[in-house]
Image (tube, helix red, strand yellow):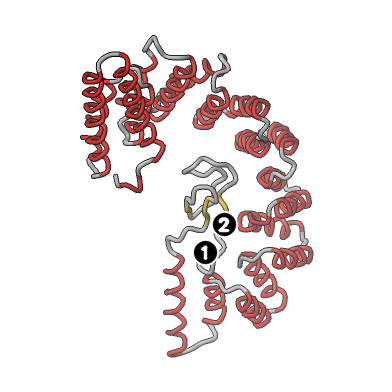
């Protein structure tokens, strides 16, 4: 732990009891004995600053011991216990965090507001420890009491997502939306898409379409819903309908072109609509700055007009949008036409460009920065929905 990693709010929590103790000691001195209160304030301050010194000098274990003593000296100070519990949880010492917060909740002199905050912290401890049933029961009680209900609802939604109980997640997201006025439409649509995917995997296509209708009602521009719809039509070999669904997915969110193009091109081929494919890709190339649609259009030009026309098109596009993936495609297209030393140089260049791409993140969460080689509808790190997007760069795209 270093100075930059210390939560300023945590330090503030730890400062509050010292300031409060000093103030109460001053008042006590006015009413009783200045000597006794001054000694108490001095003792509290000494403990506090010694603990702070340990914390700043990367000795958190010693700091925790001192702050525990500080909490014992001033048992009426809720903030100290909350700060200690948070510090334990952040360090991964969940058992100690649970004990601190349970002890705090059991105190008879807490106000309702203080008890509610302590219960929320205890619920987070249970979640971190994997005791989801205890956390769920605790948050349910808080919602029933209408105490910090939005926070409790958000925790419950997180629990139901973890348990993949999408029906409960939807119900609580709607309650949260009604309570706070903040739209949960996009998240609810993702939950309904999860249900649609489950039904599709079990061959229940009618049920899957019912969930998709609900997703579009919640969020008309749900790109994932159009993708699932396209796959359902493709499984039924209704290729014209599949083409329409995949095209709507592109129109809903063009950032997902890398995910949409493979099944869309397959649907075009089965439907015998390659002219439509070429026209649609031409429009996408104008709107999308990555290399994916360019490579797809290059392949179509190769099939229709030959290698020379395809290479000319790709070369011109690479001047406008440099890309390592595009360079690899150009090298592969020209490799067979070279001989001798030039051929060997192209082989070396192709291997170098391939190594540049190996292990590179192709997607990144625009909320927490998590990088991944494959796409996720829900970020594995921050658990946000629809936040993982393709990376647009010379190397990644």
Marking on residue 390: 2
**Residue 221 vertical placement versus 356 (above, below):** above
Residue in front for this viewpoint, 24 or 350? 24
Horizontal side of 259 relative to 132 (left or right) equals right
Q: Examine the rendering and report whether any part of residue 341 can be seen.
A: yes
Is disc 2 placed on a helix, strand or loop?
strand
Horizontal side of 12 relative to 384 (left or right) equals left
- Mark 1, residues whose alpha carbon is within 10 Å: few (<14), some, or many (≥20)? some
Q: Quadrant of residue 66?
A: top left
> Which residue: 78% across, 52% down?
240
**Residue 56 vertical placement versus 85 (above, below):** below
> Which residue: 37% across, 12% down?
106
- Mark 2, residues whose alpha carbon is within 10 Å: few (<14), some, or many (≥20)? many
> Which residue: 39% across, 11% down?
109
Q: Position of residue 235 (x, y in %)?
A: 68, 45
List the single residue furthest toward the top: 108
Residue in front for this viewpoint, 65 or 190? 65
Is disc 1 placed on a helix, strand or loop?
loop
In which quadrant of the rendered image does the N terminus lie? top left
Q: Identify the residue under disc 1.
A: 396
Q: Position of residue 87 (x, y in %)?
A: 33, 33
Residue contact at pointers 1 and 2, CB within 8 angstroms: yes
**Distance (Cα) linking label 1 and label 2:** 8 Å
Q: Position of residue 385 (x, y in %)?
A: 58, 42
Q: Examine the rendering and report whether any part of residue 75 can be seen.
A: no
Question: How many numbered discs, if any?
Answer: 2
**Residue 122 vertical placement versus 202 (above, below):** above
Residue in front for this viewpoint, 253 or 204? 253
> Which residue: 32% across, 23% down?
26
In which quadrant of the rendered image does the C terminus lie? bottom right
The mark that comes first in sequence, 1 or 2, is 2
Q: Position of residue 225 (x, y in %)?
A: 69, 43
């Amino acid at each position: 732990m270093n100075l930059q990693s210390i939560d300023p709010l945590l330090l503030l929590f730890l400062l509050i009891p010292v300031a409060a103790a000093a103030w109460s000691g001053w008042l006590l001195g006015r009413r009783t004995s200045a000597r006794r209160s001054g000694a108490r304030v001095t003792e509290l301050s000494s403990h506090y600053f010694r603990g702070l010194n340990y914390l700043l000098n990367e000795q958190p274990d010693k700091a925790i011991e001192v702050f525990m003593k500080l909490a014992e000296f001033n048992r009426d100070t809720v903030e100290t216990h909350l700060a200690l519990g948070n510090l334990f949880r952040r360090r991964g010492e969940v058992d100690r965090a649970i004990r601190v917060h349970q002890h705090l909740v059991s105190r008879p002199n807490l106000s309702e507001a203080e008890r509610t905050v302590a219960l929320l912290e205890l619920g987070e401890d249970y979640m971190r420890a994997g005791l989801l049933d205890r956390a769920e029961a605790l948050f349910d009680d808080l919602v029933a009491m209408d105490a910090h209900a939005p926070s409790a609802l958000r925790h419950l939604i997180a629990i139901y997502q973890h348990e993949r109980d999408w029906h409960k997640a939807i119900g609580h997201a709607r309650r949260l939306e009604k309570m706070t006025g903040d739209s949960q439409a996009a998240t609810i649509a993702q939950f309904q898409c999860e249900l649609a995917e489950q039904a599709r995997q079990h061959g229940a296509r009618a049920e899957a379409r019912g969930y998709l209708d609900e997703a579009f009602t919640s969020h008309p521009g749900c790109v994932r819903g159009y993708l699932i719809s396209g796959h359902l039509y493709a499984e039924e070999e209704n290729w014209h309908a599949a083409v329409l669904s995949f095209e709507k997915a592109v129109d809903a969110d063009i950032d997902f072109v890398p995910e949409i193009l493979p099944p869309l091109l397959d649907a075009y081929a089965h439907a015998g609509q390659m002219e439509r494919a070429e026209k649609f890709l031409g429009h996408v190339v104008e709107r999308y700055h990555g290399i994916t649609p360019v490579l797809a259009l290059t392949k179509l030009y190769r099939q229709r007009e030959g290698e020379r026309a395809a290479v000319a098109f790709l070369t011109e596009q690479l001047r406008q949008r440099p890309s390592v993936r595009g360079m690899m495609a150009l090298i592969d297209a020209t490799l067979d036409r070279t001989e001798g030393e030039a051929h060997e140089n192209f082989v070396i260049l192709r291997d170098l460009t391939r190594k540049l791409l190996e292990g590179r993140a192709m997607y990144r969460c625009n909320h927490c920065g998590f990088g991944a080689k494959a796409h996720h509808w829900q970020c594995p790190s921050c658990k946000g929905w629809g936040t993982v997007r393709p990376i647009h760069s010379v190397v990644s795209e």
